[in-house]
Amino acid sequence: AQRVTQPEKLLSVFKGAPVELKCNYSYSGSPELFWYVQYSRQRLQLLLRHISRESIKGFTADLNKGETSFHLKKPFAQEEDSAMYYCALTKTSGGGADGLTFGKGTHLIIQP
Amino acid sequence: ETGVTQSPTHLIKTRGQQVTLRCSSQSGHNTVSWYQQALGQGPQFIFQYYREEENGRGNFPPRFSGLQFPNYSSELNVNALELDDSALYLCASSLGLRDAYGYTFGSGTRLTVV
């Protein structure tokens, strides 16, 4: 069974500092990885996915299959980045659907 | 373009009762999935419906059941409610079976079982 681990429950950094939110996964096949974000009083929304290899709001994430990690990074944090961040995984092949497997989330606080 | 809407927003039920939660998918989306999010946890996959049939299920007992209607809206039914069923229930819709097309989440229904 797949599992996603986000070791930090809470991460507090100062505005302008670099941010790294850690995500490790375990899955026997070839997964697809995502980062979802939930801003205060808003619904869960997709931030980025590894297959797109894109940068959204200055965030990037690289899939490291050797270390089974998908850490989220931003070089200079902004106050509007404060939110709850969830790493998630889904399988890319096989029949049926397993949905998304989420980590427990990391609460990112950007201090002024 | 409308997003995913869920009703009701809050609900209080007594242990042993049954509950039905509703979800209207985003316009054009044919796949609906349901998640349970307990306090301090990430969402946990319950099941997914594609074109009115369940095509995937997480580790939840049979007393969690669902329906998808021809207009792609969906219901989540939970029988014999237990205290541990207290959680935020999220509905997500997408175009296609996998998240490759992007899931759109609703705001959720907060269920409290007393």
Image: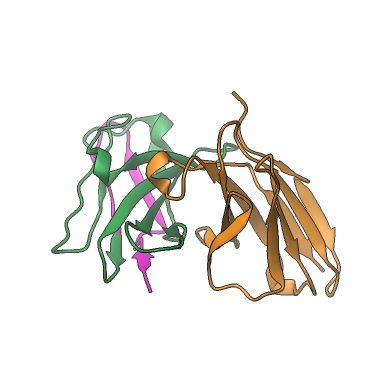
Q: Is residue A100 above or below residue A26?
A: above
**Of residues A38 and A51, the one drawn nearer to the viewer in this rendering:** A51
Q: In the rendered image, what is the letter of the chain coloured orange?
A: B
Q: Looking at the rendering, in which quadrant would you find the N terminus of chain A?
A: bottom left
Q: In the rendered image, what is the letter of the chain coloured green?
A: A
Rendered image quadrant of residue A24? bottom left
Q: Is residue B61 left or right of residue A76?
A: right
Question: Residue drawn 83% across and 66% down?
Answer: B18
Q: Residue furthest top?
A: B1
Rendered image quadrant of residue A48? top left
Q: Is residue B60 left or right of residue A14?
A: right
Question: Residue drawn 50% across and 59% down?
Answer: B42
Q: Looking at the rendering, in which quadrant would you find the C terminus of chain A?
A: top left
Q: Is residue B40 among what the camera can see?
A: no
**Of residues A108 and A39, the one drawn nearer to the viewer in this rendering:** A39
Q: Is residue B58 above or below residue A35?
A: below
Q: Is residue A81 above or below residue B50?
A: above
- Location of residue A105 in the rendering, given as x and y in whole percent from the top left corner: 43, 55
Does the segment drawn in magenta span residue B44?
no
Query: What range is drawn magenta here?
Result: A1-23
Question: Residue drawn 41% across and 40% down?
Answer: B101
Does the segment drawn in magenta span residue A6?
yes
Question: Residue drawn 30% across and 64% down?
Answer: A25
